[in-house]
Amino acid sequence: MVAAQGITAGALARLDHLVSTPGTEYRYCNAGYVCLAVIIERAASRPLPDFAREHVFAPLGMASSRYWPGPARHPPGAVPLDPHYPAPLSLGDGGVWSTATDLIRWNQALERDELGVSALLQTPGRLDDGTRLDYAWALGVREHAGRRIYRHGGRWARLSAARGRGSRRPWRPQPPRVRRAPTAWGGGRGPWGPASGRGSTAPASTSRR
């Protein structure tokens, strides 16, 4: 586990109370995906970058995408950010460096359900009382003209990015498939730009079910 993840996990461990009862309130929280990254690493007994490369990037042919934990501020050959605003090195809530071409490929994979997780990733959460949220796994969920729209954006320093995708046909609810889901990310900048700004992959840690 990289230092940034350890710092986040340590800070969470020191909390002596919850902000709200889990399942009763939606709160946007980057730390939730940092925890998810740690869970994946422990379950797979391997670093998240290796797991993602084997199970996501390689199968989809996303050769220009990777998780980058440091210690350098950016991967070799990447377009560097403003040195006053280096990209954080935590994984799960961010840490993916990619290209616009690879992110289009990611959208295609979600549309075609090539990894078998699209229904899970795109299903909005619900609170314990049944209230439906407009947020799924790192995706805002909206409806327009009878069609479902999935979107997310992020910003870091002087960069901003957004990713959106609409369903091809009027949406009908489908049950999620119970499979392990990889972490997801937002829009892109290339070549080798950070896949998104902070806040691009934050789950609702107290409300996703």
Image (cartoon, helix red, strand yellow):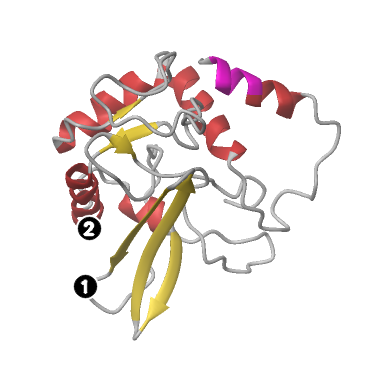
Real-space CA distance between mark 2 and mark 1, rounded to the nearest whole angstrom: 9 Å
Q: Magenta span has 5?
A: yes
* Of residues 31 and 147, the one drawn nearer to the viewer in this rendering: 31
Along the polypeptide, which appears first: circle 2 or circle 1? 2
Taking the magenta stretch, the answer to whether it contains residue 78 is no
Residue 174 appears in the figure: no
Task: Name the quadrant containing residue 98.
Answer: top left
Residue interval drawn in magenta? 3-7
Q: Which residue is mark 1?
A: 168
**Dominant secondary structure (helix, strand or loop) of the stretch shown in magenta:** helix
Secondary structure of the residue carrying numbered label 1: loop
Name the one closer to the observer, 3 or 205: 3
Please provide percent x and percent y for residue 85.
50, 33
Residue identified by numbered label 2: 111
Q: Residue at x 37, y 41 (%)?
A: 179
Choose between 138 and 179: the one closer to the eye. 138
Give residue 59's position: percent from left, percent from top.
17, 33
